Amino acid sequence: MAQFTLEEVLEATGGQCAQQAASAITFTKVSTDTRTLTEDSLFVALKGDTFDGHNFLATAKEKGALGAIVETGRGIDGLVCIEVPSPLAAYQALARYHRRRFNIPVVAITGSSGKTTTKELVATVLGAQFNVLKTEKNFNNEIGLPKTLLELTPDHEACVVEMGMRGLGQIEELALIAEPTVGVITNVGTSHIELLGSQEKIAQAKSELVQHIGADGTVVLNEDDDFVRAMGTLTEGKKIFYGIHRSATVTGSQLRYKKDGIKFTCRCFDELFDVFLPMIGEHNVYDALAAVAVGRALGVPSQKIARALGDFKGMSMRQEIISFPDFVILNDAYNANPGSMAESIKALGQLDGKRKIAMLGDMLELGDYSEQAHREIGKLLADEGYGAVFTFGEAAKFIAKAAKENGVPFVKVCDSHLDMAMAYRDILTKGDVILVKGSRGLRMERVVEELKEASSV
């Protein structure tokens, strides 16, 4: 838990304290949420489109906060108020100040898809040798990243953070806060293309991380992704490339698919060793290879790496396998973009089943590319031999249309999660394997909940 004296807060943020306050004051915790405030903590009054932390200053005082970071002129009596032009910028500066207290590896991960899985795998691999702090949940933005960094303690020996972005300059902003020593780029796809306009622009945004890795740092890049491979020229740091289909420093080969995961042979620098990954899909092998590269770069022996990957527990709603008496669900409902959707559609075939079913929601933020992307998914479902396709959402109707046009035997456009679950119950065949996936806004996990409820009746 990060602690700061008043002098340190003023130094880090460049703020001004209007009240007369003792310089010996120490804040025992920093929080942007009054619900988590404790005695003698420092409250940061952030503002958003629908909230204003300044409205909760009295609450912070009642909860025992000792001080608050506020906009200039908006302090209240009874709190040590540090006034700044932007509380968010001050919060980020405080996190950077705290991060500089620790001479430890900070690994930053970004990419169009797979970054959360890669973050978890990297943290698992490093956890075999170090005490690791990692990004929790989806705290990968301008507020979540500082929150993670402010949780660093002297007990931590490494830190793994995820960096999301919705536009140019945002990865740079996060990199300037975290000052990573290792940067990982998983891939460049078409997620957020509505905001950036092209894959080239997306690649430019992702490459901001590489450009902020210094000469004494390391970048880990996907050799099989042309956009990512080209980023190797943007840093003077050490470069480690990983991949499956091209020669790289870290490669995965001889992939053997099993019902409970994938076994593959990993070549890393001068070593060759087998890895069992309790996940399905080739795309997860890429994420594991990135974790191998980071682990070896930071001194984790290959035996520990292989053991850690084999013990990986996975994450809820990210290719989570849920078994029912008559069918199996691959719950990949956390989010979706064209790349991850295609990967999951292909990966479902790794599960033993008589018939492949898809229950898919919209892929959001694709702009003018939306119809084409959804139609391509529909065709892919036919190419991969799916027996039935259910869709939910306006854009997903194009998936349904293309799937039907390309020969999928059963296609239904649904009005709700319940409608989808009930429609499937009408055609259920023992031995089905079902993919459930869509963008976060579609909440496709509710289909799984409806199917669970129907199965318990």
Image (cartoon, grey):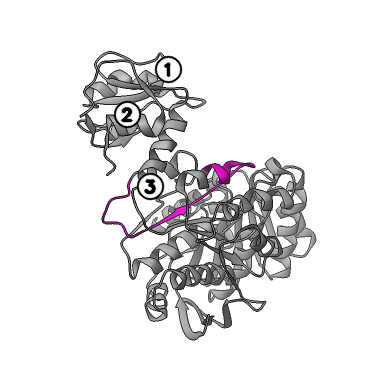
The residue located at (45%, 31%) in the rendering is 88
* Marks 1 and 3, the one that precedes in the sequence: 1
Quadrant containing the C terminus is bottom left
Residue 262 is a magenta residue: no
Dots 2, 1 in contact, CB < 8 A:
no
Q: Which residue is mark 2?
A: 43
- Circles 1 and 3, Cβ within 8 Å, touching? The answer is no
From the image, tell me which residue sits under label 1: 72
Q: Residue at x 44, y 64 (%)?
A: 122
Q: CA distance from mark 2 to mark 3?
A: 19 Å
Residue type beneath disc 1: Thr
Along the line of sight, which residue is nearer the eye, 410 or 25?
Answer: 25
Helix, strand or loop: magenta stretch:
loop
The image quarter containing residue 155 is bottom left
Residue 394 located left or right of residue 139: right
Nearer the viewer's eye, disc 2 or disc 1? Answer: 1
Q: Quadrant of the N terminus?
A: top left
Residue 32 visible (yes or no):
no
Residue 47 pos. (x, y %): 46, 25
Q: Give the residue type at disc 3.
A: Arg
Q: Which residue is mark 3?
A: 99
Q: Say what amino acid the circle numbered 2 marks.
A: Phe
Is 171 a magenta residue?
yes
